[in-house]
Image (tube, rainbow, N blue to C red):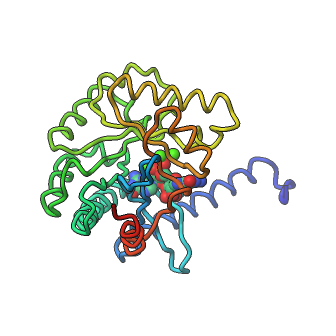
Amino acid sequence: AKSRHRGEHSFFTRDMNVEIEERVKLLHGLRSAFDNERLFLMYQPQVRIESGEPVGVEALIRWRGDDGRFIPPDRFIPLAEHSGLIVNIGNWVMRLACYEQVKIAAAGFPNVQMAVNVSLAQFRHQDFINQVRSALADTGAVAHQIELEITESMAMEDADFVAGKLNELAQLGVKVAIDDFGTGFSSLSYLQRLRVDRLKIDRSFVKDLCTNQRCRQVAEMVIQLSRKLGLGVIAEGVEEADQAKVLLGLGCPDAQGYLYARPMEPEALHDWLAERRA
Ligand code: C2E
Ligand code: CA
Ligand code: CA
Ligand code: CA
């Protein structure tokens, strides 16, 4: 309480102004970073737990600031979302990720699929389906090797709209996963209506899988649910061998996390894949 003498109100207001100013600055920086190609993608492998075989990668955006330091996506994605900038950024991400899928396939890994995060504003944009179609056509990416990740909260938004979009995506041949699954505390009924391919168990449940009975039960429930609905399932944020073991025991075949690999730049990813050539 460095300025208590100013009184609660002015202290609060000043704080908010600083926050707004910071956000405006950040947004400005993001715009210029996008224009000046200071955004790039890293790729984090997804593996079959039993064999360690690479089955996919997730594209994760990075922003290198002027000072060389990274600004984490959790800080700028929400901002990009609010400002609408995410539509262009997201389209760029999708095209680059498709292009990388083609390169990975050409390097001898045609079965390694590419997961791409899609934000709500992007998903809702009227051009979204066309953008996906163009990304596929322009890069030559194989549609069924592209998996778009939408979050559970997005999937629950407006049931008819979402169901319609997912049908259109299915017609294009791309796959869809529900990210951060289990965090939405949703009624699960919406799931039967949505044409999705895979559920992604949120990191928060994986984290305490071995120590917290409830986390284990949520993970177990998601895995059973996926089986009953005929969907795939993958766990994110797997850091320890014990977690992988429990997940495999519960019937989850695939995992992503620091235990296997951190997000990597393309060159490192290609080395990593080459070391694991079957
Ligand atoms: P997400 O989609 O849930 O992505 C997984 C996040 O978990 C990534 O953080 C990844 O680096 C991190 N992670 C992976 N394995 C582990 C692990 O074993 N332990 C821990 N502690 N973390 C792990 P990242 O790259 O910082 O991304 C954060 C979020 O930003 C993403 O969460 C996603 O929601 C968003 N994001 C990232 N790239 C994009 C993008 O291109 N478009 C959109 N719309 N959102 C993106
Ligand atoms: Ca994701
Ligand atoms: Ca996730
Ligand atoms: Ca998550």
The location of residue 150, given as percent across then percent down, is: 37, 42
| 193 is higher (above) or lower (below) than 274 | above
Residue 31 visible in rendering: no
For image coordinates 51% across by 57% down, the residue present is: 260
The location of residue 116, given as percent across then percent down, is: 34, 53
From the image, which quarter does the C terminus lie in? bottom left
For image coordinates 44% across by 59% down, the residue present is: 44
Q: Quadrant of residue 33?
A: bottom left
Q: Quadrant of residue 191?
A: top left
Q: In the displayed structure, does residue 204 sit left or right of residue 193?
A: right
- Of residues 259 and 126, the one nearer the viewer is 259
- Of residues 264 and 69, the one nearer the viewer is 264
- Residue ranking furthest to the right: 5
- Residue ranking furthest to the left: 137
The location of residue 21, given as percent across then percent down, is: 57, 63
Q: In the displayed structure, does residue 128 sit left or right of residue 219?
A: left
- Of residues 240 and 7, the one nearer the viewer is 240
For image coordinates 51% across by 79% down, the residue present is: 66
| 148 is higher (above) or lower (below) than 38 | above
